Image (tube, rainbow, N blue to C red):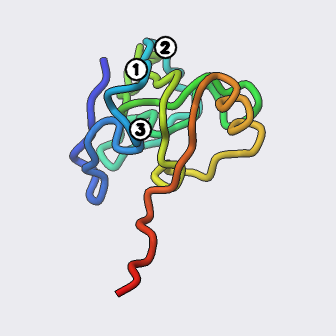
């Protein structure tokens, strides 16, 4: 069961906030492992939205769409497996090997920062 954890101050983003185009993406269900998940302020464990799945390396298959509570053990969660991504909205910098693997699977990476205006 996936959800957005609004209890953590400063982390109230809509699911898929890192997507440049929410309409033209593919999401699939994957099993999220409790091992390596981040601890939340309430004592729970979470796989955070924007985490590269299963790891930020050449094995990358996708990007976690929304926070997943794994406090009770491994849980299913939604993973974007193809789409346009704002790379600078991910919680950690994408490793080159992960970016190469994801690009080969149909991902397009962009920057969300607005270009400076001429006025």
Alpha carbon distance from label 3 to label 1: 10 Å
Identify the residue position indicated by label 3 in the image: 49
Judging by the rendered image, the residue that carries numbered circle 1 is 78
For label 2, the residue is: 30
Residue at position x 46%, y 25% in the image? 80
Residue 113, how many percent across, how many down? 44, 64
- The image shows residue 51, relative to residue 119, as above or below, that is above
Q: CA distance from mark 3 to mark 2?
A: 13 Å
Whole-percent x, y for residue 102 in the image: 65, 30
**Quadrant where the image shows the N terminus:** top left
Residue sitting at x 26%, y 58%: 9
Q: Position of residue 22 (x, y in %)?
A: 33, 32
Label 2 crowd (10 A; few <14 / some 14-19 / many >=20): some
Distance from Cα at disc 2 to Cα at disc 1: 6 Å
Q: Secondary structure under badge 2?
A: strand
Vertical order, 27 against 44 (above or below): above
Q: Is residue 63 above or below residue 96?
A: above
Q: How many marks?
A: 3
Residue drawn at (62%, 52%) of the image: 93
Does the residue at mark 2 contact the one at mark 1 (Cβ under 8 Å)? yes
Q: Residue furthest left?
A: 6
Q: Earlier in the sequence, mark 3 or mark 2?
A: 2
Q: Is residue 7 left or right of residue 67?
A: left
């Amino acid at each position: 069961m996936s959800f957005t954890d609004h209890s953590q101050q400063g982390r109230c983003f809509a699911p898929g906030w890192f997507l440049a185009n929410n309409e033209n993406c593919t999401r699939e269900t994957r099993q999220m492992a409790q091992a390596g998940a981040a601890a939340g302020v309430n004592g729970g464990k979470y796989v955070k939205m924007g985490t590269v799945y299963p790891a930020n390396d050449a094995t990358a298959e996708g990007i976690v769409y929304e926070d997943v509570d794994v406090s009770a053990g491994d849980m299913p969660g939604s993973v974007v497996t193809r789409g346009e991504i704002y790379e600078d909205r991910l919680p950690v910098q994408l490793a080159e090997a992960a970016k190469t693997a994801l690009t080969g699977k149909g991902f397009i990476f962009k920057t969300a920062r607005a270009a400076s205006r001429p006025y």
